[in-house]
Amino acid sequence: MRKIKLLLLTVLLTSVLSVGVNAQGDRMIVEESRIGNTLLRATLDSVDDPLSYCTDSVSETDGYLTILSSTFSNQTCDKLKLEINVQEKVNGYWSTIHTLTYTENNTDCIDKLTNYSPANSGSKYRLKTYHYATVDSENFVKVNISPEITAK
């Protein structure tokens, strides 16, 4: 009897977890890749989403944070907007210390590479980015949070 209960519990948990994974379908795929000490995280959505590919990364070199953020659409958007929030972890909480905003009209991409200083040695940093698109008066937004890095 105990083995049957265990088997039923296992089948139930497996089916619940399978439904959770399959419920996502092809809606969102998170890609991560490491290049040296930089971890890139991107989301890739279905072809109906004008924010089809958004990627953000942050790395630190010689006291500067190097920020790469890109928004690509599968169509020309009336407006694309990129808001990059540089965050530092202070007393266990993330605090925005700097914000960069870029807007482009009638385009299908925004691609920005910039530096920010100072990076305090031993501090943890990350990016919280908002990728916005406007198509035919309809607004779309995607929020990415990059992996944290520790400044050397």
Image (tube, rainbow, N blue to C red):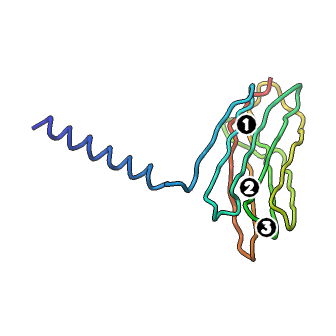
Question: Could you tell me how far apart the alpha carbons at marks 3 and 1 are, in whole angstroms?
Answer: 37 Å
Q: Residues within 10 Å of mark 3 (few under 14, many from 20)?
A: many
Mark 3 or 2: the one toward you: 3
Residue drawn at the location 32% of the way across and 44% of the way down: 14
- The image position of residue 116, as x and y in percent, is 89, 39
Please state which amino acid type lies under the numbered disc 3. Answer: Cys
Name the element at disc 1: strand
Question: Could you tell me how far apart the alpha carbons at marks 1 and 2 are, in whole angstroms?
Answer: 22 Å
In the picture, measured across the screen, residue 69 lies left or right of residue 146, that is right
Q: Nearer the viewer, residue 146 or 35?
A: 35
- The image position of residue 54, as x and y in percent, is 72, 51
Specify which label sits upstream in the sequence, 3 or 2: 3
Mark 3 or 1: the one toward you: 3
Mark 1 or 2: the one toward you: 2
Quarter that holds the C terminus: top right
Q: Residue 60, relative to residue 14: is it above or below?
A: above
Name the element at disc 3: strand
Specify which label sits upstream in the sequence, 1 or 2: 1
Question: Which residue in the structure is indicated by mark 3?
Answer: 77
Please state which amino acid type lies under the numbered disc 1. Answer: Val
Specify which label sits upstream in the sequence, 3 or 1: 3
Question: Which residue in the structure is indicated by mark 2?
Answer: 130
Numbered label attached to residue 140: none
Question: Which residue in the structure is indicated by mark 1?
Answer: 90
Q: Residues within 10 Å of mark 2 (few under 14, many from 20)?
A: some
Residue drawn at the location 49% of the way across and 54% of the way down: 24
Q: Are marks 3 and 2 in contact (CB under 8 Å)?
A: no
Question: Could you tell me how far apart the alpha carbons at marks 3 and 2 are, in whole angstroms?
Answer: 16 Å
Residue drawn at the location 9% of the way across and 38% of the way down: 1
Q: Are marks 1 and 2 in contact (CB under 8 Å)?
A: no
Please state which amino acid type lies under the numbered disc 2. Answer: Tyr
